[in-house]
């Protein structure tokens, strides 16, 4: 296998090297452990001349140092967690960071590949996730929220850059994110109103602090600022029951998002608490925008479907569209039908009659999102938290 003229010790080493390369091709991860162990034995058994040969050879195999992906597999962690630990970024516990660094040292990880922390860019990205756009398009609630986020970023010395992420674009969400976050930024605020829990997968691998706004899932381990939707829906439904002494109906969004599902929970809970059979509730599925809700409600009325004495609506746009339809078919608001919305968008005060609604402190939500993100940016140790903002009922003339 090797030339007899080569000194015995060198020949032994060359043979050993061949063995390592063969082993490397079989199981790369265990290669590093074996290499370190064998080199330690070799250093003990042979003199400094052989050590120099080993060091020279090690330079030749330097390209085979373990990767962060392989470390993640060894430690049973996500690649994102390993990356955050190696790059000294927030997002992992002290214990996890210690495990990653110790294992990286043991497996000869090439720490020269890690970029030295640069000065803060002073930039925060607002990513607006659009699944269908039906909820966040043409809704002043989100205009106020984004304005609040921008104002609070400026107040804290940050510039805000906004980008839309489209689920059904020709380019995948992952590729969109790679293109968007190609320049330096300190953190991300993710407007997740239209997201399902499986939509968060590409975002988990961003090695940046992230705060999600306007949705929450237990399985998504990210900071979030969300509305107490159940509380708000219960308030509205209880109020209608108290005022009308009948079971209120429900104007439920035909587009399924997590906020609306939580509001549905609050509505049905309030019915059961008042002793009503929730299965007998009159529920209409309407689009979550004014024109769509108006058209669908007209069709329901023209089909002579059962109508309730009062309604709780998933948002103010549904309520406004339904009110318009009721009035066009001769119903009086609130004498014949009472309606309560949700969000308290500015339009509520211009409707006739003014719309009773659940008020969401939307500017406060923007402020909390920015403050939490900056806190995470400046901290190396943190646990994701849920910030839930409470609501209050604004009583106007629609009830």
Image (tube, grey):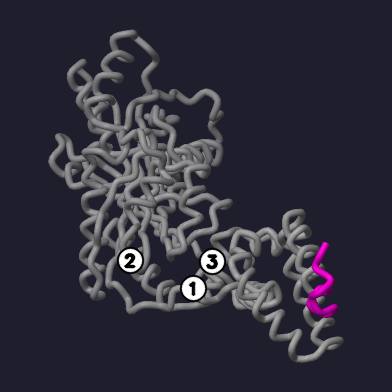
Look at the image and tell me whether residue 327 can be seen. yes
Query: SS at mark 1?
Result: loop
Q: Disc 2 or disc 1, which is closer to the eye?
A: 1
Q: Residue furthest bottom?
A: 48
The quadrant holding residue 94 is: bottom right
Residue at point 25%, 71% (across, down): 158
Image: 242 above or below 187: above
Specify whether 79 is left or right of 18. Answer: left
Q: Nearer the viewer, residue 305 or 257?
A: 257
Magenta stretch contains residue 9: yes
Gap between marks 2 and 1 measured at Cα: 17 Å
Q: Residue furthest front?
A: 5
Question: What numbered label is drawn on residue 83?
Answer: 3
| Residue 141: % across, % down | 25, 47
Q: Nearer the viewer, residue 192 or 3?
A: 3
Q: Residue furthest top?
A: 303
The quadrant holding residue 25 is: bottom right
Query: SS at mark 3?
Result: helix
Residue at point 14%, 34% (across, down): 352
Q: Disc 3 or disc 1, which is closer to the eye?
A: 1
């Amino acid at each position: 296998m090797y030339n007899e003229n080569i000194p015995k010790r060198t020949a032994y080493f060359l043979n050993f090297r061949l063995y390592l390369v063969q082993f490397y091709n079989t199981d790369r991860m265990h290669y590093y452990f074996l290499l370190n162990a064998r080199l330690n034995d070799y250093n003990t058994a042979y003199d400094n001349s052989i050590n120099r040969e080993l060091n020279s050879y090690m330079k030749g195999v330097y390209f085979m140092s373990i990767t962060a992906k392989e470390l993640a597999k060894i430690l049973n962690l996500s690649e994102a967690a390993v990356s955050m630990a190696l790059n000294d970024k927030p997002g992992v516990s002290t214990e996890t960071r210690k495990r990653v660094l110790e294992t990286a040292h043991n497996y000869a990880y090439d720490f020269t590949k890690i970029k030295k922390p640069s000065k803060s860019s002073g930039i925060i990205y607002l990513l607006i996730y659009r699944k269908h756009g039906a909820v966040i398009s043409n809704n002043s609630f989100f205009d106020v929220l984004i304005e609040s986020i921008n104002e609070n970023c400026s107040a804290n010395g940050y510039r805000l850059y906004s980008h839309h992420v489209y689920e059904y674009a020709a380019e995948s969400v992952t590729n969109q994110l790679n293109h968007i976050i190609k320049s330096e930024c300190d953190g991300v605020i993710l407007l997740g109103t239209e997201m399902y829990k499986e939509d968060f997968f590409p975002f988990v691998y961003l090695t940046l602090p992230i705060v999600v706004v306007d949705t929450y899932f237990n399985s998504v381990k990210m900071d979030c600022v969300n509305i107490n939707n159940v509380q708000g829906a219960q308030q509205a439904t209880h109020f209608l029951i108290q005022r009308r002494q009948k079971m209120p109906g429900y104007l439920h969004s035909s587009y399924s998002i997590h906020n609306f599902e939580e509001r549905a929970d609050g509505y049905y809970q309030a019915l059961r608490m008042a002793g009503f059979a929730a299965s007998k509730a009159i529920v209409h599925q309407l689009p979550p925008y004014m024109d769509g809700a108006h058209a669908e409600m007209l069709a329901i009325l023209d089909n002579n479907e059962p109508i309730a004495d009062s309604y709780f609506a998933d948002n103010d746009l549904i309520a406004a569209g339904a009110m318009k339809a009721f009035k066009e078919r001769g119903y009086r608001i609130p004498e014949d039908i009472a309606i309560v919305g949700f969000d308290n968008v500015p339009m509520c005060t211009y409707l006739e009659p003014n719309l009773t609604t659940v008020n969401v402190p939307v500017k406060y939500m923007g402020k909390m999102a920015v403050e939490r993100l900056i806190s995470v940016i400046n901290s190396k140790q943190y646990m994701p938290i849920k910030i839930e903002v409470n609501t209050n009922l604004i009583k106007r003339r629609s009830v």
